[in-house]
Amino acid sequence: MNTNNSTPRPLVGISACLLGENVRYNGGHQRDRYICDTLANFVDFLPVCPEVGTGMGIPREPVRLVGDLDNPRLVGRESGEDWSERMDSWSAKKLDALTEEPICAFIFKAKSPSSGMRQVKVYPPEGGQPRYNGVGFFAARFMQRFPMLPVEDDGRLHDAVIRENFISRLFTFNRWLELLSGPQTVGALVDFHTRHKLLLMSHNVEAYRRLGKLVAHAKEQPLEDAIAQYGEELFSAMQLKATPKKHSNVLQHVMGYFKRQLTPDEKQECVEIIDAYRNGLVPLIVPVTLLNHYVRKYDNEYLQQQVYMHPHPLELKLRNQV
Ligand code: SF4
């Protein structure tokens, strides 16, 4: 069972140049093959170019960040023309417009003075060497407005673990938006939590327990507050990476559901495959596929509904790397 089948395709905001749009200062683009050729088959994109949006034109003088790390100015590299006020006011309008869109995540162009989400160069006003830990002018405002939203940049997405984590969060956010758009009841929250238990456990066991208690006591506070608190804690918990050690614990937990049905040989095979995964000898997809076989064979209803067993489309091959 693919838990994503009934949910609408996620909508992902993205720096427009990553889609191959010719919006860079030099009239070029930064098309990303994985994003355009693979991820695009499973999500819809909403492209954003803050520099073009602000009216800088194509081609244009490149800009850079200058001044305080926390509140730098955005200025022309040669002319010193200050674009800060204009991009600030465009960003405020754009972010208002984005609150109306069901976006589930944002992919930023790494290191851009407007769109980079981390390690962007910030130059001292008096000249000299830049510091490398700034945040792009638009990206900073975006992340302040949407603190729960999964964000990554194209550079970090080349790391298999970061990519898998980001895409899991993105699809989870999409299901979360679906919950928010339907009738909000304690039952709907309980159902959402139940389906996400193992996924949550693979990121953060303490949060899994905390959120379990929150859901169990949801009736004791206004439902709106319980849902808001749940969402905040869930997406903050999922920022912690799901590591091989955490995945192995979840896989053993899954195996426990079959302790009466599996023969000693089958149990031994599961243990060996989980160990091989933990030791980096086989990818995560191997133990998950074996366990999914038993989920189907023994028709385990609880595990069938676990998002963890199918967190994103198989075709993305996110669990295929050691
Ligand atoms: S990095 Fe951002 S501002 Fe620069 S071209 Fe790409 S989308 Fe536009």
Image: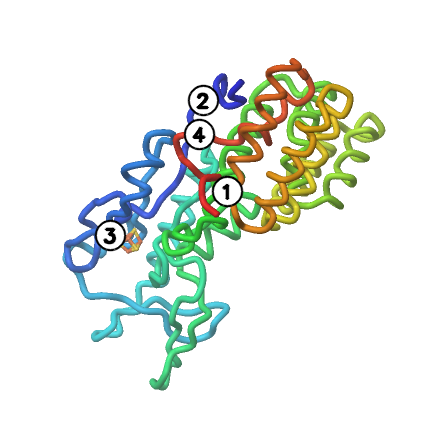
User: Where's residue 149, x and y in %?
Assistant: 52, 43
The image's colouring method is rainbow
User: Where's residue 287, x and y in %?
Assistant: 57, 35
Q: Residues within 10 Å of mark 1 (few under 14, many from 20)?
A: many
SS class, disc 2: loop
Q: Which mark is residue 46?
A: none
Camera-near label (3 vs 4) is 4
User: Where's residue 231, x and y in %?
Assistant: 64, 37
Camera-near label (1 vs 3) is 1
SS class, disc 4: helix
Q: Amino acid at mark 3?
A: Gln
Marks 3 and 4, Cα distance to the nearest angstrom? 27 Å
Residue, disc 2: 8
Q: Residue at x 50, y 68 (%)?
A: 70
Residue, disc 4: 314
Task: Give the vertical position of 266 relative to 158 (above or below).
Answer: above
Marks 2 and 3, Cα distance to the nearest angstrom? 28 Å
Residues 83 and 60: in front is: 60
User: Where's residue 175, x and y in %?
Assistant: 55, 27
Residues 80 and 305: in front is: 305
The quadrant of the picture showing ligand 1 is bottom left
Marks 1 and 4, Cα distance to the nearest angstrom? 13 Å
User: Disc 3, ligand 1: is the CB inside 8 Å?
Assistant: yes
